[in-house]
Image (spheres, grey):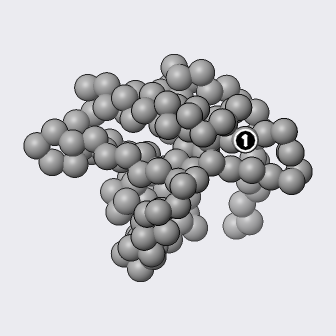
Amino acid sequence: MNGLFAEDGGLRDRFMDTGWPAREGAAYYSELVGNPDAVCLLAREDRVAGHLVGRIGRSSMRPGAVTGVLESMRVDPAFRRRGIASALVERFFEWAGSRGVNEFSVSAYSSNEAALALYGKHGFAAFETKLIRPIS
């Protein structure tokens, strides 16, 4: 998780707390264990090559939606361009599909063209747009 924060949010969001994984990461992953609405997938070769965290989301504002939320994903740079991210996404689709989801969602920084291309390849399309106006 440290790598994800450092190379994605840390480069793209000036307010991202890159120290969060060291302080909160253990509690975050501990909460996933035993939660039937959450999954942490690992891809391994000779070591951990990538991870994906997903959850099942429900909202009273959208009562008909049961959403498979791809919350976090990263593939180690040494293992990229080998299909690992696609395999993680497809496995997440299988897991969430078996739990009755009827849509999937993911958030990505608009400047992360590689992530946007990957998600587009798996059928994700823009649904909402969040605009930020920085104050100098």
Q: Quadrant of the N terminus?
A: bottom left
Callout 1: helix, strand or loop?
strand
Q: Quadrant of the C terminus?
A: bottom right
Disc 1 designates what residue? 66
| Residue appearing at x 45%, y 28% in the figure | 90
**Count of labels in the image:** 1
**In the picture provided, is 45 more to the left or to the right than 131?**
left
Query: Is disc 1 surrounded by few (<14), some (14 to 19) or many (20+) residues within 10 Å?
Result: some
| Residue appearing at x 22%, y 36% in the figure | 79
Residue 19 appears in the picture as rendered: no
> Residue 68: which quarter of the image?
top right
* Residue 73 percent across, percent down from the top left: 43, 46
* Residue 55 percent across, percent down from the top left: 57, 50
Amino acid tagged 1: Val
| Residue appearing at x 39%, y 35% in the figure | 88
Which of 83/27 is in front?
27
* Residue 24 percent across, percent down from the top left: 45, 76
Q: Is residue 127 above or below residue 22?
A: above
Residue 33 appears in the picture as rendered: yes
**In the picture provided, is 89 more to the left or to the right than 82?**
right
* Residue 84 percent across, percent down from the top left: 31, 31
| Residue appearing at x 80%, y 52% in the figure | 59
Most extreme residue toward the bottom is 23
Which of 1/39 is in front?
39
Which of 10/71 is in front?
71
Q: Is residue 27 above or below residue 57?
A: below
